Amino acid sequence: MSDDGALAQGAAHAAAHAKAMDRIYRRQRHFYDLTRKYYLLGRDDLIAGLDAGTGCHVLEVGCGTGRNLIAAARRFPGARFTGIDISQEMLATARSNVARAGLDGRITLRPGDATAFDPAALSDGTGFDRVFLSYTLSMIPDWRAALAQSAAALAPGGRLDLVDFGQQERLPAAFRAFLFNWLARFDVTPRADLGEAVAQVSAAQGLIGDWRSTRAGYAWVAQLRRSH
């Protein structure tokens, strides 16, 4: 396939994904945060560990309703934040939530495809001190590309944090089957080879990466760090 053909195919896939996300969240966005707090476990631990000091520029890839950005901005008042999402429906809710929180001066929201966004344009060419993804990779078809692109957005000394569904490896098999079947209804697929992908992206980009299972395998967390 030619480069032009590959670009056209990539754009078509991104448009299809955006349309699918808008379809899923057109109604869900209005009550998304009320329901997700019961099973998107580990989000607040990730936010608390960002260590985003004064002057830090933080990017959330797949920011959804803006819930995480608002929580992070309140916890780290000296940092500034950018969020991207492929769903215009979600961004509409995020903009409303950010404005209601009085944080539109510190949180910038932009439409963006997690697999193909321009880190330089979003960060004025400097990259980001912190990048995080919260239950995002399990919803992105080309999730490996999204992980690589997010890691590429790191400034020198920067760090990427992520949390997502694990493989429920220390939980009852019946629970795992129920959860995976239920998640599939929303086009969510826990990534069994997340650890392998973290290692591959780290090696390709010269990063220090690690991942671990938490909450009996309910969630997996990872960090990728760029040296100075």
Image (tube, rainbow, N blue to C red):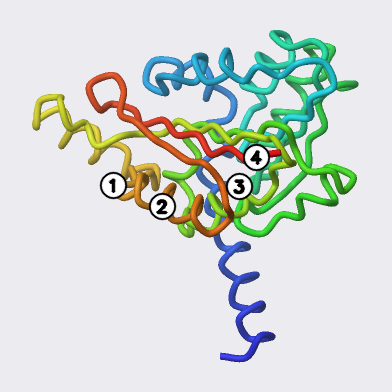
Q: Which one is in front in this view, the residue at disc 2 or the one at disc 1? A: 2
Would you call the spot at circle 2 few (<14 residues within 10 Å), some (14-19), or many (20 or more)?
Answer: some
Mark 3 and mark 1: Cα distance apart in space = 19 Å
Mark 4 and mark 1: Cα distance apart in space = 28 Å
Secondary structure category for the residue under label 4: loop
Q: Residue lying at the far bottom in this picture: please name it.
A: 2
* Label whose residue precedes the other's in the sequence (3 or 2): 3
Marks 3 and 2 close (CB-CB < 8 Å): no
Marks 4 and 1 close (CB-CB < 8 Å): no
Would you call the spot at circle 3 few (<14 residues within 10 Å), some (14-19), or many (20 or more)?
Answer: many
Nearest the viewer among 8 and 54 is 54
Which residue is located at x 58 percent, y 30 percent? 29
Nearest the viewer among 65 and 84 is 84
The residue identified by callout 2 is 197
Q: Amino acid at mark 1?
A: Ala
Secondary structure category for the residue under label 2: helix
The residue identified by callout 4 is 227
Which residue is located at x 9 percent, y 32 percent? 173
Q: Residue lying at the far left in this picture: please name it.
A: 173
Q: How many marks?
A: 4
Q: Amino acid at mark 4?
A: Ser
- The answer to whether 46 is drawn above or below residue 199 in the figure is above
- The answer to whether 224 is drawn above or below residue 98 in the figure is below
- Residue 184: image location, x then y, percent: 31, 45
* Label whose residue precedes the other's in the sequence (2 or 1): 1
